């Protein structure tokens, strides 16, 4: 039997109640092991990651919100559950761990979980519903004790929730980023009526439908269990972010996102509420989003400029020395900063500049959602004094989608190189070298044949043939004596 999880006792000043929930002691190899905590009477701000368990693989998290009405007061319970799939049968030891939820530390003393074989499937117990399109209803053992709920006693309260695929702009250029998100909207009053259903199994097909084969996709933040408060058509809504990506189209083919569907748990409320009871009857409701298309237009004069980076970029630069001298190396950093696809931002081509040696660049990226900055670091050595025209060395052509124009980013620094022009040092003579000089003086000057290696190869072949003949003769003598 699993050991109970012992949470810390909150102080009287703690406004919320946070506890770890008990874990299952046994489960089949096809089952799911869960770690969960419950937050009562408060808002979830942040919590630490669930631990990695030996013998199990994380398979996603779920969140469940339950509203209870006790003596006329409403209480909201939020449960965050981490799912684990076992790798195989056996007994696994769950080591002690701790979670931090809203600053409260929850500690577990660990337990032992027994994973058994998969239960046999009883085909006779499976019944086909009369209406295959009707939502499934779960029937538990409590129905045998208390009787099935009577739907006639419950009323279906209308909700204003909806599912939507939202693009931040209807038209983009090739290479320009468009942010597309899948969101579920509901009003604050709808929280008591709706709950997520089997979210970990519903989300992967939705993400697959959002994939675009003709666009570079930059993943956004993960699905959030904490909603955002937004206003839509003058009404306040709670918005759950199910998926959010930035797409950079590679061709002029439009980005088409099909209609999507999400099934939620929809509760019916008891017509005559009873104190101390849940007063709800669970059912299912499927929400559909409309399809969205983002038009993609080609870059103007694309044949003239060729492939260029697209985005709202600015150029910044830095140099490692304030005073440059002839023959002294220095580092020059060319930074491209702004919004756009950093992966499509290539190093600017370098032009030959007399009297300047250039090495590099070293490339480094600093990403933020939808853009960031890319640094190109060069190592340079100036061989001539005077002004150093870096703007003649490199330049980067980019297309600005906001102005629909091409911009050329180039350096603005013109550092001064001080010192005299360094005369080329004469090459040392071989006979003046302290090692090679005496070696060359004592070397044999006799001419050698150009065929010496060919002769050595021929002699080696004859030697190998002779050795093979001697070995064969010895083997023949040994056979005759035997």
Image (tube, rainbow, N blue to C red):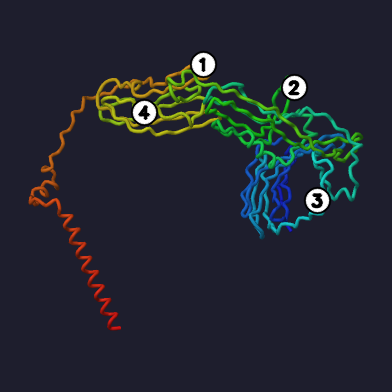
| Residue 277 picture location, percent across and down | 87, 40
Gap between marks 2 and 4 measured at Cα: 53 Å
- 87 or 209, which lies in front? 209
What residue is shown with label 1? 403
Q: Earlier in the sequence, mark 1 or mark 2?
A: 2
What residue is shown with label 3? 126
- 76 or 306, which lies in front? 306
Of helix, strand and loop, which one carries label 1? Answer: loop
Of helix, strand and loop, which one carries label 2? Answer: strand
Task: Between label 3 and label 1, give the one nearer the viewer.
Answer: 3
**Residue 204 left/right relative to 143:** left
Q: Earlier in the sequence, mark 1 or mark 4?
A: 4
Note whether 200 is above or below 374 in the view shown: below
Pick the quarter of the image with the C terminus: bottom left
Tag count: 4
Gap between marks 1 and 4 measured at Cα: 30 Å
| Residue at x-position 25% and y-position 76% | 474
**Residue 473 left/right relative to 74:** left
Gap between marks 1 and 2 measured at Cα: 34 Å
**Residue 392 left/right relative to 315:** left
What residue is shown with label 2? 235
């Amino acid at each position: 039997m699993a050991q109970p999880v012992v949470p810390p006792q909150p102080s009287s000043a703690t406004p919320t109640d946070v506890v770890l929930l008990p874990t299952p002691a046994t489960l089949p190899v096809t089952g799911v092991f869960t770690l969960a905590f419950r937050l009562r009477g408060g808002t979830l701000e942040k919590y630490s990651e669930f631990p990695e368990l030996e013998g199990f693989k994380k398979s996603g998290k779920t969140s469940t919100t339950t509203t209870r009405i006790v003596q006329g007061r409403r209480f909201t319970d939020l449960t965050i559950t981490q799912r684990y799939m076992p790798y195989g049968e056996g007994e696994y030891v769950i080591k002690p761990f701790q979670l931090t939820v809203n600053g409260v530390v929850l500690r577990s003393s660990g337990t032992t979980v027994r994973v058994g074989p998969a239960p046999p499937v009883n085909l006779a117990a499976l019944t086909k519903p009369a209406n295959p399109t009707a939502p499934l209803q779960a029937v538990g053992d409590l129905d045998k004790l208390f009787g099935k709920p009577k739907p006639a006693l419950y009323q279906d309260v209308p909700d204003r929730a909806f599912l939507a695929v939202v693009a931040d702009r209807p038209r983009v250029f090739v290479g320009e980023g468009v942010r597309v998100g899948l969101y579920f909207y509901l009003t604050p009053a709808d929280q008591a009526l709706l709950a997520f259903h089997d979210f970990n199994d519903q989300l992967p097909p939705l993400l697959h439908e959002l994939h675009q084969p003709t666009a570079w996709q930059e993943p956004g933040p993960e699905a959030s269990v904490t909603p955002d408060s937004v206003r839509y058509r003058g009404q306040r809504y709670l918005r759950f972010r199910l998926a959010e990506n930035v797409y950079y189209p590679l061709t002029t083919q439009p980005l088409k996102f099909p209609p999507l569907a999400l099934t939620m748990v929809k509760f019916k409320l008891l017509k005559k509420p009873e104190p101390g009871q849940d007063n709800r009857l669970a059912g299912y409701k499927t929400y559909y989003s409309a399809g969205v298309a983002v038009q993609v237009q080609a870059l103007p004069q694309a044949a003239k400029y060729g492939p260029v980076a697209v985005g709202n970029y600015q150029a910044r630069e830095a140099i490692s020395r304030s005073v440059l001298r002839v023959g002294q190396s220095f580092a020059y950093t060319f930074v491209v900063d702004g919004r756009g696809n950093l992966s499509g931002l290539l190093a600017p081509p370098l032009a030959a500049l007399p009297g300047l040696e250039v090495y590099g660049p070293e490339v480094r990226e600093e990403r933020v959602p939808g853009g960031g900055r890319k640094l190109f670091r060069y190592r340079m050595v100036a061989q001539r004094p005077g002004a150093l025209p870096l703007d003649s060395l490199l330049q980067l052509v980019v297309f600005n989608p906001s102005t629909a124009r091409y911009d050329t980013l180039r350096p603005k620094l013109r550092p001064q190189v001080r010192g005299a022009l360094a005369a080329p040092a004469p090459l040392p003579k071989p006979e003046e070298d302290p090692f090679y000089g005496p070696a060359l003086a004592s070397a044999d000057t006799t001419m050698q044949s150009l065929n010496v290696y060919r002769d050595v190869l021929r002699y080696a072949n004859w030697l190998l043939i002779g050795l093979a003949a001697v070995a064969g003769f010895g083997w023949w003598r040994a056979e005759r004596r035997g």
